[in-house]
Image: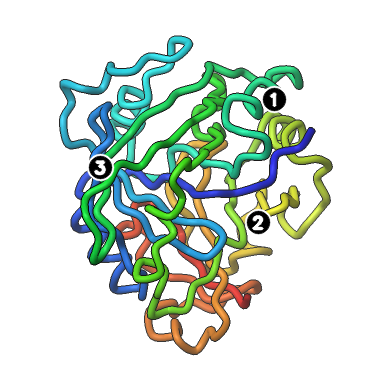
Amino acid sequence: MKLPGIDHPLVLLRDIEAGRAFYASLGFTLTPVGKHPWGTSTSLAVLERSALELMGIYDESLIDAMDVGGFKFGRHMRDALAEREGIALIALHPGQGAAEDGEAMAAHGLPYQGHLGFRRKVKPPGRDWDEAVVSLGMLVDPALPRVSHFVAQQHKPELLWVPEWMQHANGATHIAAVTYWAPQPEAALNRLTAMFGPAVAVPGGHAVQTGQGVFRVLTDWAPEFGDAPRPNVVGPAAVNIDFAVPDLSKVAAVATIATPGGLAVPDIASAGNVLVRFVAA
């Protein structure tokens, strides 16, 4: 079994409102800030086939809530944010379901903590308050904390894929790729190929094609990103998100660095220690 692909990266921020304002300046529509039961705050840019999640900490007293297999989501996020801002985890589309997919990946030898279910309050535009019901299959490798994932299953998808939230001034339709910087790439590649299938050589490293988006693992930055700044991280770690847009001219005013694959946003700090790039859909 192979997992379907990228659902949404989680970008950890010390100031979620500042992050929301920055991503709005790039042409994204952001959902109102919501709260998870383990103390993290959340705001999303909901795309047609994927999403971006901005995340902060609103209450450290809750970070040890809802332990699953020794994994505590809130504590993992708090500890990662204490280290630095940036992409902490990547959520994946479900195949059979969060729990079933997690168990299937465990059979492939990947660490699997178990199934985590939760609810959070949501108020789509023009509707009453409701509760999103979500199941997560946690696939976190303690040896690769920044190359870890979870399967995210929305049981009420209509509360997330809301037409008003999916209209973006930049025209973004989906996440085309996520890039890992990995000077020693073997462990990251082994993990990704176990989930998605073979890797192929690309300029600067390797790529693993999924049913939704590409994971790159790079050891050389310039062939893919040219003069664009690389986030300052100790790899392996996710450092870039490529957003597909139908018209690159719509983002040329904010994505001012031309790279071999698209237009990159120069301000990686305001993006949460992430290189945001727009590529042709």
* Residue 37 horizontal side relative to residue 243, left or right: left
Q: How crowded is mark 2: few (under 14 residues within 10 Å), some or many (20 or more)?
A: many
Of helix, strand and loop, which one carries label 1? Answer: helix
Residue 230 or residue 197, whichever sits in front: 197
Residue under label 1: 105
| Residue 107 coordinates in the image, percent (x, y) | 74, 17
Residue 218 or residue 159, whichever sits in front: 159
Mark 2 or mark 3: whose residue is earlier in sequence: 3
| Residue 82 coordinates in the image, percent (x, y) | 28, 31
Of helix, strand and loop, which one carries label 3? Answer: strand
Mark 1 or mark 2: whose residue is earlier in sequence: 1
Q: Which residue lies furthest to the top in this view?
A: 70
Residue under label 2: 213
Residue at screen point 56% across, 35% down = 151
Residue under label 3: 121
Is residue 19 shown to the viewer in this render? no
> Which mark is nearer the camera, 2 or 3?
3
Is residue 55 shown to the viewer in this render? yes
Disc 1 from disc 3: Cα separation: 30 Å
Disc 2 from disc 3: Cα separation: 29 Å
**Relative to 258, does residue 22 appear above or below in the rendering?**
above
